[in-house]
Amino acid sequence: MPTYKYEGAYAGGEKVSGVVEAASRQEAVAQIRQNCEIVLSLKEIPKSFTQRPAAAMMGKISPKALAFTCQQFAIVLKAGLPLVQTVDLVAGQCDDKALQRLLRQVSEDVSNGWSLSYSFDQRGGKLPVTFRETIRAGEESGDLISAFDRMARHYDRTAKTHAKAISTMTYPAFVIAVAIVVVYVIMDKAVPAFIGTFQDMGTDLPAVTVALIAVSNFTSKYGGLVAAVLAAIVAACWLFSRTERGGMLFSRLRLSLPVLGEIARMAGASQFAHTMSAMLAAGVPILQAIAVSSRSMSSLVMAREVMDTVAGVEAGRGLGDSMANSRELPQMLIQMTAVGESAGALESTLDVLAEYYDNEVDVRTERALSLLEPILIVCLAVFVVLILFAVYLPMFNLYNSI
C-alpha cells in the first residue's frame, strides 16, 4: 500500500504534517481530513523508503548495544537537538553494524515525515517488542527522553544478567567439553593399543576389560555415525521447538525439571515483572502492556498464562485476580501483583518483584552449579578408575599365574 507524506492546516491556521498509508490519493486525502480541515500538499513516498531491508539483514541485537543506543538517545535529546539530527548522531556512535544500518534508515524515514515509532515498527522487525512499544508510548505522552532513560536501565540490567549467566556457565561447559574429548581419545586411541597385548596373553579377560574393549571397538567403527545421528536428533528437536506445538512441549518439560524448572519459572517471572513495570511506567495501557509482557517471556507456557489474563482484565477484574488460576506463575508474583494493584502502586511493586526474582535466579543458579561441579568430577574419577581396573586387572592376573 502506498505511503503519502502530507502537510495540512487546521481552521485556525495551525499547520500539521505527517504520513498516512492509503490505497489511493483520494483515500489519503479522506484520512487526512479526519484530523485537519485543509490539505496543503500530498506527496507519495518512493517505495525504496517504505521497504524493510534492514529487518531482513539484521541479526539478533544484543541488550548491551540496545542499552548504549538508548543512553545516547536520552543524552542527545536532553541537549535539545532535532530528532533527525539525533538519530544521525546516535547512528554514528553505534558499533553494532546491523543496528547502525537500521538507524540510518530510521533517520531517512523521520526526515520524510514518519514518526520515530512508526519507522521502528516498519524497519525494526527484529527489535524487541518492548523497545518499539516504549517508544510509541513515549511519543504519545510527549516524553521520549524518559522512555529512552527507562529502556537504557532495562537493557543495561538485561545485559549484565546475560553476561553473568555466560560467565557462570563457562567453567562447567569447559569441563564437560574436555571430558568428552578425553574420553573419546582414550577409547579411540589408547585402549586399542592394549587390545593386542591382552589378546596375546591367552588368558581369560575380566568382564570390565571385555566391556572396555567392546566399547572401544564400537567407538572406533561407529563413532562418526553416532555423532552424526546425535547431531541430527539435536537439529530435529531444535526445528520442532520452533513450532508452536513443539515450543509448548519443550517449555512444559523445562518447567517440570527438578531445580532447573524452578529457575526457569523464576526467570519467567522476572521477565514479566521487568517488562510490565517498564510498560506501565511508559504509560502503555494495561491490556497492551500485558500483551507486550507475554511476548517478552522465554517460557511459552508462562506467556500463554499471562495472555489468558486479558479476558479477566477486560471484564473488569484486577490483573492479580485474573492471574489467580495460573499454574506456572509463582504464587508470590500473583499475590504481590494483587497487593500492588489494590494499593495503587503496581509499577513500583513489579519493580521490587523483578529485583527479587533476579536475585533468586542468581542464587539458585550458583547453587545448582556448585552441585554440578563435584558431580562432574566424581563422574570423571569413576570413569578413570574403571579404565585403570580394565587395563591393570589382566596384568595382575598374568602376574599371579606365573
Image: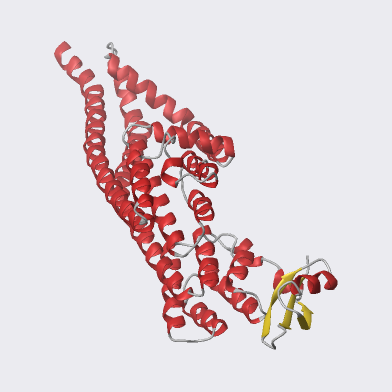
Give the residue displayed 54% in from the left and 64% down from the top: 132
Say whether residue 59 is left or right of residue 201: right
| Left or right: 297 as drawn, with respect to 106 | left
- Rendered-image quadrant of the C terminus: top left
Name the foreground residue: 130 vs 283. 283
> What quarter of the picture does the N terminus occupy?
bottom right
Q: Nearer the viewer, residue 334 or 161?
A: 334
The quadrant where residue 39 appears: bottom right
Is 44 placed left or right of 70 in the picture? right
Vertical side of 111 occupied by 349: above or below: above
Foreground residue among 5 and 204:
5
Q: Residue 141: percent from the left, percent from the top?
A: 51, 71
Residue furthest bottom as drawn: 13
Point out residue 113 in the picture as x, y percentages from the top left corner: 66, 79
Q: Looking at the image, which residue is at 74% across and 71% down? A: 34
**Residue 76 is drawn in which quadrant?**
bottom left
